Amino acid sequence: MRQSADTQKKILALNWKMHPATIGKAKELFIDTKKATKNAKRATIVVAPPFPFLAELRKLSVRTHMYLGAQNVHAEKTGAHTGEVSVPMLQSLDVSYVILGHSERRATGETDGVINEKVRGALKAKMQTILCVGETSRDQSGSFFNFVEDQVRTALAEVPAAHIKHLLVAYEPVWAIGTGDHATPLQVEEMRLFIKKVISDIYSRATAEKINILYGGSVDGKNIETFLMETSCDGFLVGGASLKEKEVHDMCARIEAYDA
Ligand code: PGA
């Protein structure tokens, strides 16, 4: 299994969602992504394509700077679960990251309880687990903080401290996903600190300090700069812009140029 990324680098996790339409196009996009990020030294590039493309893209990712991720996984290692994919299957394809709890999966009925089972299974197997959390909307009362806290706490219920080092949390406010209406750096930074505090309360301060917090929601080659300058996010989870070579190039270039 490929080892996980250097935690000092910024993570650029590219969530292709249900794109592109064919394996031919997926290979093209992967090669374009490889070119666009070839100078990455300060960025860890993670590509999360649809399941059917993983085996072929693995061949293209050998001895590169790119890691493979999956967009979902089942909690059990094996069994009668029609249509599901397990952690050992993914690991046998050198997939080292998995995105869990994405709002688009929650919208299909995936509950906090199911997400918790998946998170436990993935972390136990040492997968780099990107847990997505985020409110659907905000109001003046600030209740979205409680909402996000509940999501973090239920997802991490009964996760032993020994497994937590493979966790990453992506703050993805639902209102910012695919809308072009990204959160402000202040909103992101505030929530980043809040999530750290929640993890610190559950585990310890030292544990929380080591957990990478990403931001996702309409990140692109232009606005990524303000998040680099004005937040301490450890990386980004990117949807729409991950399908465009120029955007990927610009995001990576801005990470490289950013003087931490
Ligand atoms: P977006 O998607 O970049 O298109 O907003 C982000 C995500 O869903 O992870």
Image: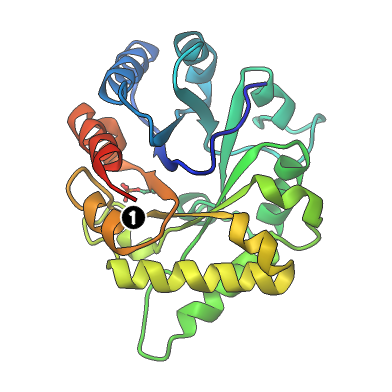
Check the image and tell me how it is coloured: rainbow
Q: Residue at x 59, y 25 (%)?
A: 95
Q: Is residue 254 left or right of residue 231?
A: left
Q: Residue at x 61, y 55 (%)?
A: 210
Q: Is mark 1 within 8 Å of ligand 1?
A: yes
- Give the residue at mark 1: 217
State the residue lying farthest toward the front.
259
Residue 9: x %, y % from top left: 45, 41
Q: Is residue 99 left or right of residue 188?
A: right
Image quarter for residue 195?
bottom right
Q: Nearer the viewer, residue 60 or 37?
A: 37
Q: Could you tell me the amino acid type at mark 1?
A: Gly
Quadrant housing the N terminus: top right
Q: Is residue 76 left or right of residue 2?
A: right
Mark 1 Cα shell of 10 Å, populated few (<14), some (14-19), many (≥20): many
Q: Residue at x 34, y 10 (%)?
A: 24
Q: Nearer the viewer, residue 11 or 69?
A: 11
- Relative to 245, say whether 223 is above or below: below
Residue 62: x %, y % from top left: 51, 11
Would residue 71 be visible to someone looking at this image? yes
Would residue 17 be visible to someone looking at this image? no
- Relative to 18, say whether 134 is above or below: below
Q: Nearer the viewer, residue 213 or 51?
A: 213
- Relative to 31, say whether 85 is above or below: below
Image quarter for residue 13?
top left
Q: Is residue 219 left or right of residue 173?
A: left
State the residue lying farthest toward the bottom.
141
Q: Residue at x 39, y 36 (%)?
A: 43
Total numbered badges shown on the rendered structure: 1
